Amino acid sequence: MNVSVSVVLFTSDLRLHDHPPLRAALGSADAVVPLFVRDEGIEAAGFPAPNRRAFLADCLAALDTGLRERGGRLVVRSGPVVERVCEVAAEVGAAEVHLAAGVSGYARQRERRLREALAAAGRRLVAHDAVVTVVPPGAVTPSGAGSDHFAVFTPYFRRWSAEPHRTPLAAPRRVRVPDGPASEPLPDRASVAGVSPGLAAGGEKAGRSRAASWFRHGLAAYEERHDDLAGDATSHLSGHLHFGTVSPAELAHRARRAGGPGGEAFVRQLCWRDFHHQVLAARPAAAHADYRARHDRWRTEREAAPEIAAWREGRTGYPVIDAAMRQLRHEGWMHNRGRLLVASFLTKTLYVDWRIGARHFTRWLADADLANNQLNWQWAAGTGTDTRPNRVLNPVTQGRRFDRAGAYVRRWVPELAELEPPYLHEPWRLPAAERSRLGYPEPIVDLTDGLLRFRRARGQE
């Protein structure tokens, strides 16, 4: 008796709940091969990313466990993705390979090459939309001719909100995997060196548990508390969204059903994520080049080496900036308000190239998604989709506003833990002897000087 087989290639969708490629493959074949390829093209990109590697190891272990609970298993291979997928498809005689449609230029080129290679062998590639996003990139475009994507968020949000969103799918009860295709050992989190000590656990079980807790206890107050640095009242789902252990479509569905100001605000954030994905899909070069052409004379790594090092280490002399940068090192994550502040400080106050900041985030963030990381940095730098590119965030004013009692600074900058306002956010106002006793650095730049440099570079004097 012949058994029909399909391959499901997992990429940024490491889950079983709400997984259209897996459900389609199970519906069209007697058995499936759940496959993950450790892409040597990505691993050879030249930057260390221990937090993402550790988080990925958790995700793959959880995916394998979930499949085994349903009678299946995960097959892991390493090497060139196109070659490995074709290799597995030939081993099991698969007629089809299913995967989630990619967004980045690299992912789309890989998908094109895979489609051609499979076709040459008489096999078919089936790419599924709305797996890594709520609405597929390109599904919502401006009215009229002249643009293939939205460059401004608000009109995109209106159209995105009116777009029908698919109903989330349940996880399959059984996954039959054919005998034969061998798997490499799963990567082990414990074997990854340089992982942040406070890095959260990855994997579908952890992601769904986090989401359930968020919807029960955090969503209702999200609108009023999402910028509260000390309150830490955000979802912490960004890493799970990056690796696809939770479904953005399912999160949007649940938040809409919950309603209220908190639900609406969270849906808006999911839309921001889709917005950046549709920008990157239309303009792949925005991953490394300015989205809006400017003529900025950014300071380079060589020109601003001491200031860049202080920024990376959380030793700038500005407490809220240093707190956020130290949180990044410890957790492999940073509060969203903190991300805005440190990005504005690097690009607007120090006037350092945004790509330097984006690379540092890529090095440490478990959720360093190409679309959101690069385009949020461009937004902060004024080269992206921000309609107010000259906006400069003052770290003192922002610290007082979003860490009013100073708990965030005290947690991450223990040198200042004994201080009370007004000195907590402006320790340089203390007497010199007191500052020396604390062991906290002096500001690496005067905010007025930074603003003048910014204005001169933009020709605004």
Image: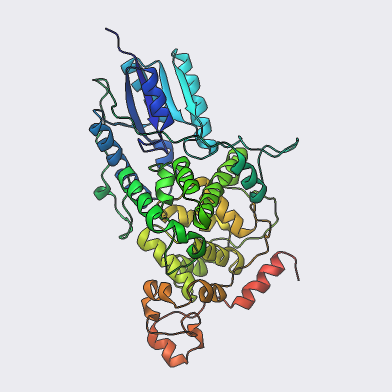
User: Disc count in the image?
Assistant: 0
Task: Residue 400: give x, y in percent of width and height.
Answer: 52, 76
Residue that appears at 43% across and 25% down: 98
Quadrant showing the C terminus: bottom right
Residue that appears at 68% across and 60% down: 388
Q: Quadrant of residue 383?
A: bottom right
Task: Residue 122: give x, y in percent of width and height.
Answer: 45, 12
Task: Residue 51: give x, y in percent of width and height.
Answer: 36, 52
Task: Residue 185: give x, y in percent of width and height.
Answer: 24, 35
Frontmost residue, 87 versus 142: 142
> Which color mode does the image show?
rainbow
Quadrant showing the N terminus: top left
Frontmost residue, 318 versus 450: 318
Residue 444 appears in the figure? no
Frontmost residue, 391 versus 172: 172
Q: Quadrant of residue 345?
A: bottom right
Frontmost residue, 77 versus 371: 371
Q: Residue at the far top: name it.
A: 1
Residue that appears at 71% across and 69% down: 456
Using residue 461 as the reference point, say whether residue 46 is left or right of it.
left
Q: Is residue 393 above or below residue 68?
A: below
Q: Is residue 185 above or below residue 355?
A: above
Residue 5 appears in the figure? yes
